[in-house]
Amino acid sequence: MARKRGLDHDDVINAGFSVIDRDGVERVSLRAVADLLNVQPPSLYSHVAGLGGLLDDLAIAATADFGETLRASAIGIAGDDAVRAFATAYRGWSRVHPGRYDLTLRTVAGSERKSAGIGAVETMDAILAHYGLTDHDARRAGRALRASLHGFVTLQAADALGRGDHDASFDALVELFLDGLRARVATG
């Protein structure tokens, strides 16, 4: 990338995502990002707080993008269809952006990453509100859904699901969650 005037934080983040998408999170370095931007690594320090700060900022940006994708997936739908759309968007985004997905799990000091992920949390809360769960049960159901989806996409990314139709297995996972959710609602 040719050096441009007025290098800013967004340029650094976009270059960091380019490195992640091309080489994975483990290959992110100030040198790799600086090379893409055609600058020297010390030039990045006016935009990020070293490699740790770069990774934190990338985690925040990835979390916000993931949350927006999940939010958009459920607009205009409710109930089981919303759960299915949310789950499909979750799996799709993690498959297209595996390194960015890994960053959504990064611990970042302060509240910025939590704030960035509010879109995903609010979407899950809105979807589960349809089922009339108490706040306590909705929180548990949300955690169960997230854990199920995370487990599936992590195993799939590691090529550890074995042979067979992974799409059908994913659909079965979502339907099992929905069956359990409906059973929980029915028993009150």
Image (cartoon, grey):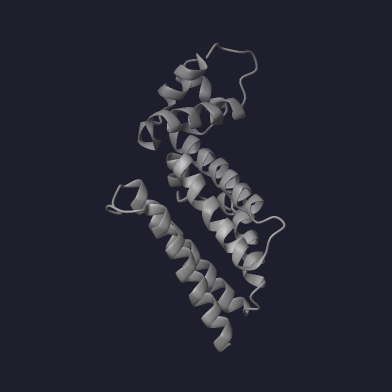
Residue occupying the point 45% across, 48% down = 106
Q: Give the camera-side residue of 8 and 80.
A: 80
Image-quadrant location for residue 78: bottom right
The number of numbered discs placed on residues in the rendered structure image is: 0
Residue occupying the point 54% across, 42% down = 62
Q: Position of residue 42 (x, y in %)?
A: 48, 21
Residue occupying the point 52% across, 38% down = 58
Q: Give the camera-side residue of 60 and 73.
A: 73
Looking at the image, can residue 147 be seen? no
- Residue 125, placed above or below residue 162: below
Q: Position of residue 161 (x, y in %)?
A: 30, 54
Q: Position of residue 89 (x, y in %)?
A: 55, 51
Image-quadrant location for residue 122: bottom right
User: Residue furthest toward the right?
Assistant: 76
Q: Position of residue 164 (x, y in %)?
A: 31, 54
Left or right of 5 on screen, residue 147: left
